[in-house]
Image (cartoon, coloured by chain):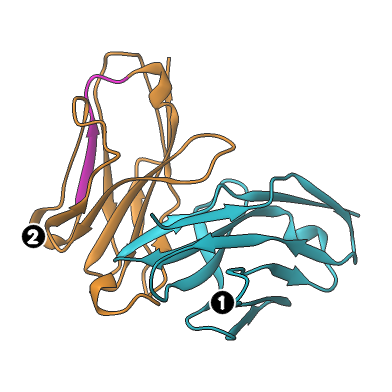
Chain colours: A cyan, B orange
Amino acid sequence: GDSVTQMEGPVTLSEEAFLTINCTYTATGYPSLFWYVQYPGEGLQLLLKATKADDKGSNKGFEATYRKETTSFHLEKGSVQVSDSAVYFCALTGTYKYIFGTGTRLKVLA
Amino acid sequence: EAGVAQSPRYKIIEKRQSVAFWCNPISGHATLYWYQQILGQGPKLLIQFQNNGVVDDSQLPKDRFSAERLKGVDSTLKIQPAKLEDSAVYLCASSLDLSRGHSYEQYFGPGTRLTVT
C-alpha cells in the first residue's frame, strides 16, 4: 500500500543553518505530496504542496520538489529561525486517502 | 473563512468512563477526518467521512470508539469505555471532496487533549 517515510528526529540546528528533512514515498498512480507543520499545542497546518512530478512547492522560505524518479519530496530551507521549531510531517494523497509520515521534530537554537 | 472548530479543548476522565468530542468542519467541506495523535507520534486516522458516509474506519477500535456525522456537517467521536492508552490528542480535519481532486489540503482543528487516569 501507499506509505511515507521520513527521517527520524529530532533535528537540532543553530539559527541561520541550512535545513533538509528527507521524505520518500511509495504510491501507485500519481499522488499529490504535502508538507504539514505542527507548532506546539496546535493542530497541523499546510506548509506547502506539489501535485505533479517536478513541481516545486514553496512557502515561508521552505521548498520541496516532487521527484518521481527518486520518489522523494525533501523539505529544505536555506536559513532557519528559532520560530521554525516545530514538528514537520510529510504526507501524500492516494486512493482518496491521506497518508502521513511519523513526523520530524526540528529544534532551532538561538 | 472560519476554521475547523473542536470542543472541548481539554478533557480529563477516569478509565472506564465515557467521553465525546465534537467537530464542526469548514463550510462546504465534504470530507471529514478524525485522527488520534499520541505524544511524539504522527496522526493516526481513525475514521474518514465523505459527506455522511464512512470511507475508511479500518483503524477505529469499534468495540469502544464510535463516530457519526449527521447531515454531512458536524461530527461526534465517542469513546466508551475509555482506557489509559486512549490518552492522546484527537484531531479533526476537513477538506474538499478528495474523490474529485487529490490535491486538496486538509484543514485541522486545534484538537482535544484527552487524559485518561
Q: Main secondary structure of the magenta part?
A: strand
Helix, strand or loop status at disc 1: loop
Chain of the residue under the numbered disc 1 shown in the image: A
Q: What x and y, as percent, mark residue A60?
A: 69, 76
**B78 w.r.t. A60: above or below:** above
The image quarter in which residue B82 lies:
top left
Q: Is B60 colored magenta in this rendering?
A: no
Chain of the residue under the numbered disc 2 shown in the image: B
Q: What x and y, as percent, mark residue A7?
A: 68, 51
What's the amino acid at mark 1?
Lys
Mark 1 on the same chain as mark 2: no
Question: In the image, is A73 to the left or to the right of A46?
Answer: right
In depth, the one of A94 and A90 nearer the eye is A94
| Residue at the spot of label 2 | B71
Q: Which residues are magenta?
A: B75-82
Q: Residue at x 21, y 68 (%)?
A: B30
Neighbour tally class for label 1: few under 14, some 14-19, many 20 plus, Cα within 10 Å: some
Q: Residue at x 49, y 83 (%)?
A: A52
| Residue at the spot of label 1 | A68
